[in-house]
Amino acid sequence: MKNNNQKAVKKLSMASLRNSRMRNLFAVTAIVLTTVLFTTVFTLAMGLISSMEKEIMRQVGTSAHAGYKDLTRAEYDKIRTNSRIKEISYNILVGMASNETLAKRQTEIRYGEPEDLEWGFRKPEKGTYPRNKKEILADTIVLDLMGVPRELGQKITLEFDYLGHKHRDTFTVSGIYQGDPMLGASQLYLSKEYVEEVIASVDESERKEMLRSGKSLGEGLIQAEVFFKSSRNIEENARKVLMECGFADNEIDIGVNWAYLSAKAESMDVQTVLGVVFILVLIGITGYLVIYNIFQISIVMDIRFYGLLKTLGATRKQIRFLVRRQALILSAAGIPAGLILGWLLGIKLTPVMLGMVSGVYGDGFTANPVIFMGAAIFSLITVLISCRRPGKAAACVSPVEAVKYVECDKGKKKKQKAASHRGKISRMALANVFRYKKKAVVVITSLSLGIILLLTIYSAVRGFSIDKYMDEMIYGDLNIGTTDYFHNYGTGDIELPEEFFDTVNDMDGVEESGSAYVSFFPFPMDETGKERLRQGMERGFLKDSIADFRKTYEDVLTQDRIMTERRFAFDPYILKQLHVTEGELDIEKFNEGGYVLAVAQMDINNKNESWYHPGDKVKLCRYDTREQYDKRQEEIYDAYGNPVDTSGIVSARGVRELPWDEYEVMAVVELGEGVAGLAAGSPEISMIVPKEELERTAAVNGFQRYLACFRIGEEHLDTAEAAVEKYTTQINPQTDYRSRKELRKEFMQMMEVLKLIGGALCVVVGAVGILNYVNSTLTGIITRRKELAMMKSIGMTDRQQQKMLIFEGLYYVIFIGLISSAVGSLVSLLILRPLSRTLRWFVYDFTLLPVALVLPFMAILAVAIPVLMYRRVNRISIVERLRE
């Protein structure tokens, strides 16, 4: 039968809330803390994703979703009318600047529409876009290289080639934007009028034909940039536009901006997804444990109240509604406060976190509504799940059971033999702890989570070795090279200017120095190497690498594909710092000749493999004549520098006809990131030879000094670093440096961020656990007032009762310590130990020190709270408590 007392139930719900102020305080605090956790995590995640996207966009050169390359005007007009496209703009490449002053910096000359320039982060910081015919928008790097002041109205003369037509003109600077030395090229923008006049000298159809035949880079053709209505499925949308416009497959090239993480969501690796799920589940469980326990205890305390409601005609559904309505009212107070506190904490932590990521821009981060929606939804779900079981328990109790209710677990009673310890206070306390097993499990789990988290974070921070990090990232106190070496994986110009080296080498305080050299050669792998490569791949080497990358190595085994050899040479100062993994490095014997050092190759999981071991014989190619080298280049590249042999298989015959030298492998070494930041292509292999041997074998094709390392006296280090910084920023911005002092600072910042974020998480999770413990202890004593009065009435003294309550708290501490140590050790073993195999500067060093430091504090709480609460309860007379 239905009743019509819904209004009364709502009033009772509010009255019950007003009557349980202590419960409300604990519940709202728990909801606030849970919401703070969710909001902080979402704020950090969104801030990091947003900033990383912006940084990648700067590297890509645009914030547009996708691009259509090398279009004619008719093709562009057809594409721009498609309904899928929200915004479209374009630029036109005219040519490359050929000024001698710009020889070290690739400088592209273009026309760009204002929208395209804005999307490409080239909006003028001074002045305007080119309006008059002979005006130009230039970046600061080009102006500095040309010796032109960074002022509007300056004149610069440009020389460039447009599809065989030479041009030399003088332009007036109408605008200036900040150049980025981390990028491999600069862009100069001319007026539309001037560019249209230049490109008209070659017919549009001829421009397209020259592109197809490899005789141009797309000069005079339109490079379109587009935004779709959403950043999801960018590539699919880009292809659909072409299909709907009537273009054939592969007729027009497209480019997808890989900065948009949402475009890659479907390819997100399982580990990342599991990591995100783990964090959300951890926060959810933390919040659930405390909110559930608060409502469960509240139900137990008010059990007679719910029994009487059923007597008066309340249905199960109405009682569940009453409990849920209270939870929602408390959420209305707790969630908004948690959102504000969590966001404030998040925006404070985000810049700090981004500050340790070199080159990541943290600007423009705002409060995204998704953060608040996500955190609020997750918090509300946690609250509703948490109050579900307590609501069900309140609804199921009968009036008779409610009046006689005593808190304990239902189940079969165990028959126990009489024992002498039956009356011991400690045994009574232990029995009381597990008399209500669910509550005990919730409290122990809640507090253990915080300690396990603290244990894991402490072990992680402790494991990062600054000495190993330094050895991996830098040799000596100061390393110098080009921006392409340090920031573009060694592609582009890596030749260290002689003037830069001499400038640093002649400084006061330089105690020791050494340079690194490299040249590239073809490498046909012998049977010994192939067998080792096959065995390595069977053991999992390259297992998680990109399929196309892995296939190049498989081609070495199945089709005799030619590898690229990076042939290194190092001065003694660097040689003696190499990390030897097999054999012994005798530098004097090595420099006599006849020996090489094999470099262990690392895959995406930092798994190292070497295809040659000490004592093996290995043959390395060389070029004796220019004709040999030119012939090899003709086998790989056409007359315009475009690769014609990307497989490395067609040209195998020519390589095997080259002269070669046989060497013995002296040792296997690992190259740290400090000297190995060079891309060679795939598949690749690296060998180290004496410098004299590199000079002999690379006499035709040449070699490059790409890095110089210096050990500098402590008293001169700051002066030297300041001079190097001035050189790289003012004299030659194409150069850069890396210092031990700055790396140490970055490492310490990284550790501080880890401590800050991890510590904040530990504090909140720990606070939730302590809140749960305090609430359980307080309400436990309050609900047991009658029980304690009965025990006192039959002769138990106040001191014995206090002792019993203290023992109960200490048992909690003991169980929390045991569980935290056991589970924490397991978590550390499963998460941190594998980390030591993937990060060479991480040393697994597990310790239980955090548990030892936290448990005494918890023991103090376990003693203080029961004593204080008992004294408060004891103010009420035994008679009054027995009558309750």
Image: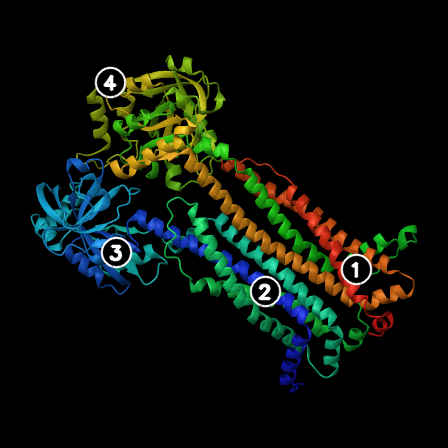
Three-letter residue code for mark 3? Glu
Three-letter residue code for mark 2? Ile
- Rendered location of residue 344, percent (x, y): 48, 60
Left or right of residue 880, residue 438 in this image: left
Q: Kindly identify which residue carries mark 2.
A: 31
Ranked by sequence position, the earlier of labels 4 and 1 is 1
Q: Quadrant of the C terminus?
A: bottom right
Colouring scheme, one of rainbow, by chain, secondary structure, one colour: rainbow
Q: Quadrant of the N terminus?
A: bottom right
Three-letter residue code for mark 4? Asp
Ranked by sequence position, the earlier of labels 1 and 2 is 2
Ranked by sequence position, the earlier of labels 3 and 4 is 3
3D distance between C-alphas at marks 1 and 3? 69 Å
Q: Kindly identify which residue carries mark 1.
A: 435
Circle 1 — which element?
loop
- Rendered location of residue 171, percent (x, y): 11, 47
The outermost residue toward the bottom is 4
Quadrant of res 411: bottom right
Is mark 1 in CB contact (under 8 Å) with mark 2? Answer: no
From the image, state whether disc 4 or disc 1 is nearer to you: 1
Ranked by sequence position, the earlier of labels 1 and 3 is 3
**Whether residue 695 is situated above or below residue 707 in the rendered picture:** above
